[in-house]
Image (cartoon, helix red, strand yellow):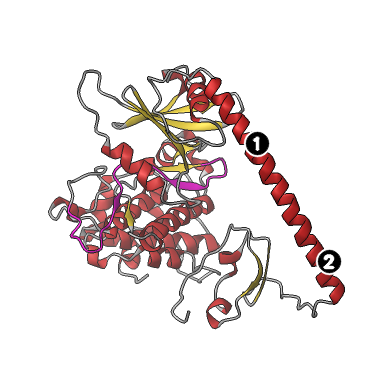
C-alpha cells in the first residue's frame, strides 16, 4: 500500500512482526504501543526472532494440541447450549418487571438481562431523584447510577412532555444509531437504552471527572496542568480524526463544546452527546436547520446552513482555545479577527492559574495554540482538516528552540502553516 499515510494500531492486543515496508519504517512508535508482543521494523520495537523449521516432533505436538482444542470446544459449546436453554426457561417463568416501562427487545446492557438492569437503575437512582443528578440540559438530565453489583453507570434520562404532546424522538434515535455504529477509545461508550411511551433513557460508561467545562470552571482547574491539557486536545483531535476520516460515511458531531467532552479519573477525554450528529452523504449538499451551541458554531452556518466537517474543526478550535485560556471568553474570538490581536502576547492569553510552560511542554502548547488559531479561522476553506491537526500536534518530538513565551505574540502564530 504505497499511499498508506497513517496506521494507528495502538491499544490493541496485537502480536507478531510488523510488515517490513518503507511506510512502516518511518512511523512513530506511539502508533504501536500497548500491544502484546509486536516486533519488527518500527523504531522502538524489539527485533523479531526468526524460528527454525519445525521438526516432526513439533508437528506431532501441534496436531495433538489442535485435536484437544477441538474436543474441548465441542464440549464447551454443548454445555453452553444446555445452559442457555435452562436460562431461557427460567426467564419465561419469571414475572416481568413493569412491562409498561420497558420496551420488549430493548438493548441488552452490559452482561445483564435488560429488565434486570432497568430495575437496578430505577432503584440505584431512586426513580431518577435529583440527588443523583450530575448534569442537565435541554434534551435530558444525566444521573449517576451505582448498581448492586458495584458497576457505575451514567444514565441520561430524556425529558418527556408533561402533557400529551409528542416527544422529539430524533435526537434519541440519532444518538443510538451513531454510537452503535462506531467504537473508539475517545468516544463515550453507549451500553444500552430503554424506550417506552413513559420512559426513555440512555446508558453510558461513567466518566468520573465529568465535563471539561465543569472542571475548567471549578476550583480544581489547577489540576489540569499543561501536560494534561495537551493530552486532552490530542484525545479530542483523535476522536474527530476518526469520525471525519475513518468512518464511512463521515460523521459530523455538530456540537463540540467543553460541556460535551468528558474526563475519566486519569483525565482521558471522550467526546459525548451525539444527539444532533450528522452522517454526511457524499452525493448530497447536506443542508440542515441551524443547531448547536452558541459561541461554538462555525460562522458560515449562519448564512449557508450547510454541514461539513469544517464545522467541527471550527468548534474544536474554540474548545482548544477555551482549554488553553482557562475559560470561554467571547472577547478572545473577537480579538482573533481584529487588528488588535497583533499586540496580544501569548503569555497574557494562557490560563493565569498555571505557571508558564517551559521546554518541550512549551513547544507542545505553542503547537496546540497554533492549530487552534488555524481551526478558528472564519473562512472554512482556510481551516485545516482534523487529520492535519492531529498529525501536526503529535509531531512535536523534541524541543524546537522557539522564542521565549515572554516575547511571543498571537500574530506570530496566526498565519503559521500546520
- Judged left or right of residue 28, residue 76 is right
Q: Circle 2 sits on which residue?
A: 61
Name of the residue lying farthest toward the right:
57
SS assignment for the magenta stretch, majority: loop
Identify the image quadrant of the C terminus.
Answer: bottom left
Residue ID at (18%, 46%): 290
**Compared to 120, does 341 lie above or below?**
below
Q: Nearer the viewer, mark 2 or mark 1?
A: 1
Task: Characterize the local packing of mark 2: few (<14), some (14-19) or many (20 or more) Cα atoms within 10 angstroms.
Answer: few
Q: Secondary structure beneath disc 2?
A: helix
Q: Is residue 86 visible?
A: yes
Residue 317 position in % (x across, y down): 34, 55
Is residue 31 in the magenta section? no
Would you name the residue on which mark 1 appears?
82
Mark earlier in primary sequence (2, 1): 2
Q: Say which quarter of the image contains residue 76.
A: top right
Q: Which secondary structure, mark 1?
A: helix
Q: Residues within 10 Å of mark 1 (few under 14, many from 20)?
A: few
Image point (32%, 37%), residue name? 172
- Magenta region: which residues? 264-287
Q: Is residue 302 left or right of residue 239?
A: left
Frontmost residue, 275 versus 117:
117
The residue that appears at 56% across and 65% down in the rendered structure is: 31
Q: Is residue 202 visible?
A: no
Amino acid at each position: 500500500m504505497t499511499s498508506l499515510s497513517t496506521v494507528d494500531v495502538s491499544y490493541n492486543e496485537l502480536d507478531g512482526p510488523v510488515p517490513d515496508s518503507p511506510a512502516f519504517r518511518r512511523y512513530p512508535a506511539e502508533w504501536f504501543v500497548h500491544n502484546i508482543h509486536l516486533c519488527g521494523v518500527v523504531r522502538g520495537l524489539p527485533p523479531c526472532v526468526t524460528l527454525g523449521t519445525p521438526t516432526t516432533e513439533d508437528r506431532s505436538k501441534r496436531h495433538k494440541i489442535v485435536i484437544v482444542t477441538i474436543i474441548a470446544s465441542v464440549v464447551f459449546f454443548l454445555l453452553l447450549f444446555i445452559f442457555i436453554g435452562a436460562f431461557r426457561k427460567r426467564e419465561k417463568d419469571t414475572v416481568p418487571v413493569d412491562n409498561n416501562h420497558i420496551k420488549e427487545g430493548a438493548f441488552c446492557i452490559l452482561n445483564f438481562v435488560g429488565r434486570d438492569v432497568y430495575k437496578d437503575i430505577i432503584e440505584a437512582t431512586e426513580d431518577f431523584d435529583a440527588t443523583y443528578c450530575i448534569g442537565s440540559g435541554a434534551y435530558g438530565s444525566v444521573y449517576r447510577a451505582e448498581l448492586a453489583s458495584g458497576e457505575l453507570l451514567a444514565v441520561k434520562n430524556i425529558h418527556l412532555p408533561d402533557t400529551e404532546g409528542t416527544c422529539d424522538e430524533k435526537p434519541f434515535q440519532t444518538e443510538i444509531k451513531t454510537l452503535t455504529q462506531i467504537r473508539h477509545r475517545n468516544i463515550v461508550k453507549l451500553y444500552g437504552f430503554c424506550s417506552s411511551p413513559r420512559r426513555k433513557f440512555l446508558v453510558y460508561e461513567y466518566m468520573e471527572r465529568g465535563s471539561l467545562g465543569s472542571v475548567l470552571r471549578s476550583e480544581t482547574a489547577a489540576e489540569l496542568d499543561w501536560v494534561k491539557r495537551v493530552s486532552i486536545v490530542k484525545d479530542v483531535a483523535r476522536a474527530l480524526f476518526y469520525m471525519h476520516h475513518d468512518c464511512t460515511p463521515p460523521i459530523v458531531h455538530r456540537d463540540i463544546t467543553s460541556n460535551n467532552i468528558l474526563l475519566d479519573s486519569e483525565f482521558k477525554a471522550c467526546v459525548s452527546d451525539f444527539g444532533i450528529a450528522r452522517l454526511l452523504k457524499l452525493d448530497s449538499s447536506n443542508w440542515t436547520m441551524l443547531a448547536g451551541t452558541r459561541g461554538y458554531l462555525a460562522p458560515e452556518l449562519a448564512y449557508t446552513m450547510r454541514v461539513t466537517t469544517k464545522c467541527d474543526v471550527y468548534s474544536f478550535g474554540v474548545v482548544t482555545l477555551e482549554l488553553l485560556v482557562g475559560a470561554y471568553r467571547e472577547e478572545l474570538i473577537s480579538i482573533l479577527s481584529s487588528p488588535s490581536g497583533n499586540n496580544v502576547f501569548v503569555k497574557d492569553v494562557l490560563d493565569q492559574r498555571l505557571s508558564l510552560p517551559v521546554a518541550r511542554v512549551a513547544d507542545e502548547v505553542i503547537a496546540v495554540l497554533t492549530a487552534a488559531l488555524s481551526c478558528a479561522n472564519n473562512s472554512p476553506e482556510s481551516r485545516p482538516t482534523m487529520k492535519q491537526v492531529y498529525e501536526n500536534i503529535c509531531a512535536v518530538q523534541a524541543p524546537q528552540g522557539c522564542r521565549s513565551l515572554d516575547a511571543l505574540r498571537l500574530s506570530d502564530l496566526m498565519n503559521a502553516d500546520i
